[in-house]
Image: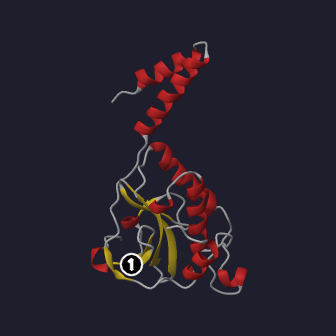
Amino acid sequence: MDWQPVADAIVCLLNGSGMVYKKIAGALLVLLLNACANIPESSDFPRGGPAAAPAGWTAYCKRNGEDAQCLKVSGTTWRLLDHINWRVNATPYMSDLEKFGGPYWDASGQDCEDFALRKRNELAAAGVPLQAMGIATAYTEKGVRHAVLAVHTDRGVFVLDNRYSTVQAWADMPYRWQSYFDPLTNTWSRIAAAEQTGP
C-alpha cells in the first residue's frame, strides 16, 4: 500500500491551526507507524511435563509476592519491548557470585535471570500484563545455563535476552530450551526438546 497520501495528510493537518488538527494528525501518525511496523511471527513453546523451578526462583517469589493472556502486538508495543530489552541490556554484566556471593535472583542483580526479572518489572510498569510474561531457561550454544524473559503475544512467544540487542522469536535462538515459568498456572514446565526448531 502507498502510505504517501496518509503522510501528506498528516503534514497538512500539522500545519493547520488549532489543537483538533494536531490531535487528528497524532492519531493518524500512530496508525501509520503501527501499520508500517515490521513485526515478525513466532510460535508457542512446545510444552513437556512439569519441571522443577530453578534455584533462586522460589526465594524470589517469596520475597516479592509474585502475582502470577497474551499481549496483542502493535508497532508501539513492539518498540516498547525492543526499547526495554536494549535499555536493560546496557547495564554491565556481573555474575551473582560477584554481586551476591552465590545464586540469587533479584531485579537489582546484573546477570541473565536478573535482567529478565528487571525487564518483566519495567514492562509491567509500562502496562504489559504480568500474565503475558514468563521466564524461560535454556543452555546456550556453549552449554552455559541461561535465562530470558519470554513474552506471549498474539504472534507467538518472543524472548528478551541480555545476549541480544533486539527481541527475538524463541525458535530462532541458538539455545537448547529447558523450562518455562507459566504465570497463568504459576508452574514451571519442561520445553519439549523434540519440537524445538532453533538453530
What residue is shown at x 64% (from left), y 69% (from top)? 107
Can you give x and y, in whole percent of width and height, for residue 109 in the image? 67, 73
Can you give x and y, in whole percent of width and height, for residue 147 in the image? 51, 74
**Circle 1 sits on which residue?**
189
Can you give x and y, in whole percent of width and height, for residue 44 in the image? 34, 64
* Amino acid residing under circle 1: Ser
Circle 1 residues within 10 Å: few <14, some 14–19, many ≥20: many
| 170, above or below 29, in the image | below
| 12, above or below 26, in the image | above
| 7, above or below 40, in the image | above
Residue that protrudes farthest toward the left in the picture: 194
Corner quadrant of residue 19: top right
Residue 179 in view in this figure: no
Q: Classify mark 1: helix, strand or loop.
A: strand
For this rendering, which residue is in front, 192 or 71? 71
Residue that protrudes farthest toward the top in the picture: 17
Q: Is residue 180 left or right of residue 26?
A: left
What residue is shown at x 60% (from left), y 55% (from top)? 125
Q: Is residue 195 left or right of residue 165?
A: left
Quadrant (top left, top right, bottom left, bottom right) of the C terminus: bottom left
Quadrant (top left, top right, bottom left, bottom right) of the N terminus: top left
Q: Is residue 111 left or right of residue 41?
A: right
Can you give x and y, in whole percent of width and height, for residue 17 in the image? 61, 12
